[in-house]
Image (cartoon, helix red, strand yellow):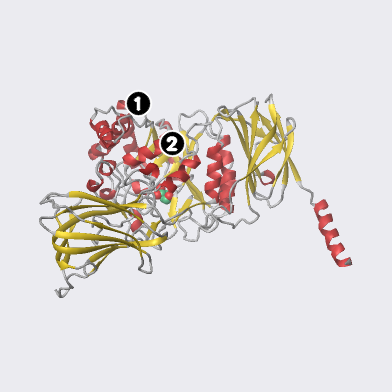
Amino acid sequence: MKKISLIFFLIFTQNLIFSQNKAVFNVHADKPSGEVSPNMWGIFFEDINLGADGGLYAELVKNRSFEFFKPLTGWKITGGKSMYGVNYGGEITIINRPEKQATNPRFMRVVMENNAKGTLGLTNEGFRGMGIKKGLRYDFSILYQHKNAKVKLHLELINPKGEIIGYEIFTPKETGENWQKGEVSFVANATEQKAKLNVWFEGNGTLDLDMISLFPSDTWKGRKGGLRADMVQILADMKPGFVRFPGGCIVEGHDLSVRYQWKKTIGVVEDRKLIINRWNYEIAHRPTPDYFQTFGLGFYEYFLMAEEIGAAPLPILNCGMACQFNSAELAPMSDLDPYIRDALDLVEFANGSATSKWGKIRAEMGHPAPFNMKMLGVGNENWGPQYVERLKIFQEKIKAKYPEIKLVGSSGITSDGEMFDFLNGNLRKMKVEFIDEHYYNRPEWFLANANRYDNYDRKSNSKVFAGEYAGQSDRVVSPDNQNNWQTALAEAAFMTGLERNADVVNMASYAPLFGHIDGWQWKPNLIWVDNLQVMPTPNYQVQKLYANYKGDLIIPILDKNKNPFIGKDSLYASSTFDKKTNELIIKIVNTSRQIQTAEINIEGMAKMGEKARLISLQNDDLKAENTMDKPFFIAPNEKEISINGKSFSVDLKGYSFSVIRIKRN
Ligand code: AHR
């Protein structure tokens, strides 16, 4: 008994000795120091980690048109002739006709010899399986041609045990020598993470097949052949200010022949020429030999998605330079025209009238109204004098035709040092509107750099676009990187510096965006997915809080000595005012283990209510993560607090990020 009392005494006295730190936050609501851009917190999208094919693009069939380097990647044939010519009934071959059909040259020929169901067939394994939901309709489609074949296709969705969880028959009509699209839908009777699709051929005759496709019907906005609704929704929930697309290194390509070319990503899907995805082979420890870009999610779908989630489009185009980590190929200055043409035509595709050449294509695809694109990036992580001389030509030609388009230029792969200084200096001289800075660094870097923009050049015409950043729990490109609470907290602290300096930092986006748990190359990622579920990371929750509670005026928030909170006593803070919601928004990050009391004094804001909202993200364990089983383990907790006057106290838990919203009545 005595022993227990002694322990209590010790704990109690220890609490008295180490009493809570109290910090005074003076908020000058009547002295805004600048404006926050409406685009401030956005999204970086790249087809990495099965972000598009196998991810956001909801197609379930992998290699639907047999155009992967190995035409039968993803497919297994059952029956048919063996390699020794022994006939098990029927035959399946791949035909190539590049002269006739350059964009989609291969198709499959199936010769049936009175085949019964189960003797000749195909199985598609999907992208790490197919995510199938009980009770949901699945839309099968196919391009085919045949003359007088008497044939039926038995479609089966099977689970890993081989049990049928969805079934339908498709009977192709006679087409002669014309390709035709056939469609049939059916409902699945079980939920399965890793289903496969069987196509059994029954009958007699020759049937040509291409674009064998299966989509769930619950796509974003129910669009046929559309995007995974849960993946778009989680982006929409963030209320992002912009969507950067299509990357990332994918813009540059390993060499110029496989650079991203937007014109090849629009129009009917079967004519979008597939290329190898650079992330197929880029990361030695995570080779992904079945990774190709089908461009089913192309530039039209991108513009549409950005519009539908309320974000400004921010396309990034190739500047005539391939990835400088890879081939470093350059388009000669004399041959830059097609690259510049692509940029000019993209503006017309996005904004031109429905009667202009490219605007007409947009209208025919279903969007006669312009997409209202205002920004365009030229080059991703490009560097050196070769980049600057190319960017100058782009700038001259784009501005001559579209002076209203604001340009984004690259500051290379590092956010300091010789490469950065050279590019940052030159781009500022050129008055490039946005300079794209990338930082993939350890959490300590993010904490130490919360003041990075406090003394940035405020006279320059160029603004910062923090276009790619993420705290690396290990090191860049390490497979051991985790989306843990430490990285998220450090990013939250750093972002107070971006928000405080929103007059010089106009946009920011975490990168990369999506990672498939069975198909990733790069870690960490903002959102993890499997075939059925999305999992927001703590880093996503931080981004979402910033974007949801953005505000449009920067409000100074200072300590007793009139200094910003940039890490003293492990505290970081920023504040904004939202004119639409009429709210003062205060963000405070406490990176210490200890609970700290914030004494908040609000000056210059009359008619405050007596209540405020406190939204916090917190965990005692810096290594804590969200998982597929517990996707909201670290998620915002919201409660009402009493503020009773212009000065009030709030307890900031250890390792916490708090957002306080105070309404002006
Ligand atoms: O986000 C992953 C990659 O990191 C991007 O493609 C590239 O721009 C950066 O190096």
Tell me the kind of residue under disc 2: Ala
- Picture coordinates of residue 76 (x, y %)? 27, 66
Left or right: 515 as drawn, with respect to 596: left
The residue closer to the viewer here, 198 or 516, is: 198
Q: CA distance from mark 1 to mark 2?
A: 22 Å
The quadrant holding residue 647 is top right
Per the image, label 2 sits on a secondary structure element best described as loop
Mark 2 Cα-neighbour bin, 10 Å: few <14, some 14–19, many ≥20: many
Residue 452 visible at all:
no
- Left or right: where 168 falls relative to 637: left
Comparing 438 with 584, the one in front is 584
**Which residue position is annotated with label 1?**
403
Residue on which the image places disc 2: 311
Judge by depth and name the residue closer to the eye, 253 or 393. 253
Q: Is mark 2 within 8 Å of ligand 1?
A: no
Residue 597, x across and y down, in percent: 73, 43
Residue type of the residue flagged with mark 1: Pro
325 left or right of 471 in image = left
